[in-house]
Amino acid sequence: MVFVPSKFADMLVHCPGTTGHGSSLLPDTAGEKVRIIIDHFMDFREQEKKKLDSNPSLTISDVTSVNLTKLKVIMIELLHKHTFKVSGYVS
């Protein structure tokens, strides 16, 4: 195993979607798309958290952290920003 310094990265995701009246159940909305992406990121975050919690010899530098740092609504799209701290260990 080789250690290299942790890397930080921001990811800004644009999710355009169908627009219309709020009383409608429109298909393919920006909110539906955002939910899918955020769920994937949070599932990955939980896996890394479990890895850290289950092994006392690991530190925060040994896992990749994902945090939702911004959620913004702009007319027909939602923007969300995630910050990643990528583990410095490469195997």
Image (cartoon, rainbow, N blue to C red):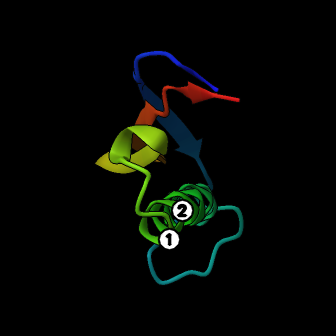
**Residues marked 1 and 2 touching at CB (< 8 Å):** yes
- Secondary structure under tag 1 reads helix
- The type of residue carrying mark 1 is Ser
- Using the image, determine if residue 59 lies above or below residue 3: below
Q: Amino acid at mark 2?
A: Lys
Quarter of the figure that contains the C terminus: top right
Residue 73 seen anywhere in this rendered image of the structure = no
In the orientation shown, which residue stands out farthest toward the front?
57
User: In this image, 4 relative to 83: left or right?
Assistant: right
At a point 49% along the width and 64% down the height, the residue shown is 55
On the image, the x and y values in percent for residue 60 come to: 35, 46
| Residue at image mark 2 | 51
Residue in the picture at 36% in, 49% down:
67
Instruction: Give the spatial CA distance, label 1 vs label 2.
Output: 5 Å
- Quadrant containing the N terminus in the rendered view: top right
Q: Which residue is mark 1?
A: 54
Report whether residue 47 is seen: yes
Horizontal and vertical percent position of residue 65: 42, 46
Give whichever of 17, 64 is nearer the camera.
Answer: 64
